[in-house]
Amino acid sequence: MGSYLEIKYLEELQQQYASVEFDSEQPEPHIYVGTEDLLALMKELQENPIWAFDRMANITSVDYKEYIEMVYMLYSRRFDKWVTVKCKLDREKPVVESMTQVWPGTEFEEREIFDLMGVEFLHHPDLRRILMPEDYTAYPLRKDFVPLQPKIEGGVLKWLQPKSLS
């Protein structure tokens, strides 16, 4: 089952990376990190034997309307410890480094997040839509999602903005 990474270790990471923050009042405080430090922090957590977070257990994103948040849940089999790393992204242009550079197994999840939430993953080896049509311009898991209307013009399927009901 494992336990959560202790505060003293989070404080060490906070000293190493300027953008790292966490709420020490929480029983399982998440690490919040800026996009500028995210990749370096993740490499440190995975590669450095004092951390040994060798498994990316889960990667997802959340739409908070004001911003998009990336959520990474890491596990260290060596120490039987968990940690959650979160990163806020600009909602209008959500861009973040791909974690395939550290955990190649995140390729599929990042493609899914790109397809359904519109997050662009820099340096991803194959970033393209995986569930929706390639020419679909909306993101179905965003809170402001309005389904596009299919229309065939000259034998070609096109996606159109729905007409207003007012």
Image (cartoon, rainbow, N blue to C red):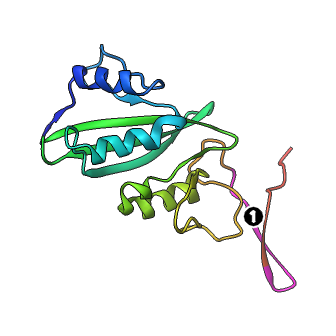
Q: Residue at x 40, y 59 (%)?
A: 106
Residue nearest the viewer, comparing 50 with 38:
50
Q: Is residue 108 left or right of residue 150?
A: left
Residue nearest the viewer, comparing 24 with 139:
24
> Quarter-wise, where is residue 45 in the image?
top left
- Residue 24: x percent and y percent? 31, 15
Q: Is residue 20 left or right of residue 25?
A: right
> Quarter-wise, where is residue 83 in the image?
top left
| Viewport quadrant of the N terminus | top left
Q: Is residue 22 left or right of residue 151?
A: left
Q: Residue at x 60, y 54 (%)?
A: 140
- Is residue 158 placed above or below 43 in the rendered structure? below
Residue nearest the viewer, comparing 147 with 9:
9
| Viewport quadrant of the C terminus | top right
> Quarter-wise, where is residue 152 in the image?
bottom right
- Residue 91: x percent and y percent? 65, 38
- Residue 7: x percent and y percent? 24, 20
Residue with the most extreme bottom position: 155
- Is residue 143 placed above or below 129 in the rendered structure? above
Q: Amino acid at mark 1?
A: Gln
Q: For mark 1, give the secondary structure.
A: strand
Label 1 sits on residue: 149
Q: Which residues are magenta?
A: 146-156
